[in-house]
Amino acid sequence: MMREIKIEAETTKLAIEKGLEKLGLTREQVEVEIIQEEKKGVFGIGSKNACVVIREKIWGEPQKEQKEVRKNIEITNDAFKPSGNIIEDVKKVMKEIFMRSKIDFKILEEVYDEKANSVYINFQSKDAGLLLYDGAKGLLSLQQIISVIINKDPNKKIVVRIDTEEFWNKTENRIKRDVEHAIDFINRTRRPYRMKPMPSTFRKIVHDIVHKNYPSYTTYSQGHGRFRRIVIRYHKSDDSQNENSDKSQNQPQENNNESSAENVQPQ
């Protein structure tokens, strides 16, 4: 059952902190609705407290239709036999998954990059919303399953990207904007910046953007499971936490003095 609390305090930040303390939850585990910002007034006249509503997030309850999609995209490795044509193999697996899920689709674009050993498939479907629901968990699951099946040979890693409704273009542009915001924050404060928790696919995009466009900055991952996030910091900041990455085994602890981005939310 979802828990909810309404809190008033002198500032919005203080109201959120009080609410989290009463619920016994972290900032990542709740949604915050600001009912009223604080107002200082003049000489104490007309001042108003901030008011917020804090709701516990409900995890793992997607729409019934999406549950059926996930249930049906189950293909064993034994059922797939590579043909030698990578694009055709990816399309074959996609067709099998969609057939089992009773989803009609049409492939709009198919690209194989031999240098990067990657496959890009863009498709159209009236049921695309099911795959894009709840942060595109269905689309990411589809992509992961296809990747696992295609990559039977551990010595020949093929990068698979499945796209619909310009999802990846929109997502990358959104993440770029949030990285720009993070860099601006770091430049002004010289403090590290914590991104919102996100899947490993999105974290890789952040790592790549910072590495390519901002060589004076470094990234590392922090947290576990669905709360795993990326921290961006100026490379001369401090400490050995810079050595941590998605591949590290020992993760740094959360730092309450770091800012948290809440706007990386792929649709």
Image: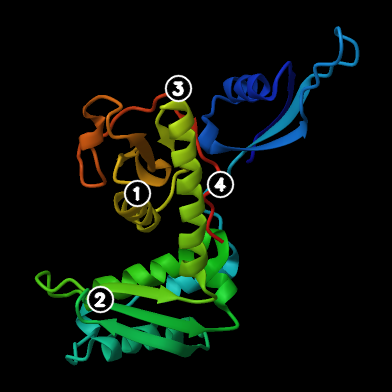
Disc nearer the start of the sequence (4/2): 2
Instruction: State whether residue 107 appears in this view.
Output: yes
The picture quadrant where one finds residue 50 is top right
> Residue 126, percent across and down?
60, 83
Label 3 crowd bin: few (<14), some (14–19), many (20+), radius 10 Å: few
Tag 3: amino acid = Asn
Q: Which residue position holds label 3?
A: 257
Label 1 crowd bin: few (<14), some (14–19), many (20+), radius 10 Å: some
Q: Which residue position holds label 2?
A: 149
SS assignment at label 2:
helix
Q: Are marks 3 and 4 in contact (CB under 8 Å)?
A: no
From the viewer's perspective, is residue 212 above or below residue 118?
above
SS assignment at label 4:
loop
Q: Quarter of the image containing the C terminus?
A: bottom right
Residue at left offset 37%, top offset 87%: 110
Q: CA distance from mark 4 to mark 2?
A: 33 Å
Disc nearer the start of the sequence (2/1): 2
Q: Which residue position holds label 4?
A: 263
Tag 2: amino acid = Ile
Residue at left offset 54%, top offset 32%: 27
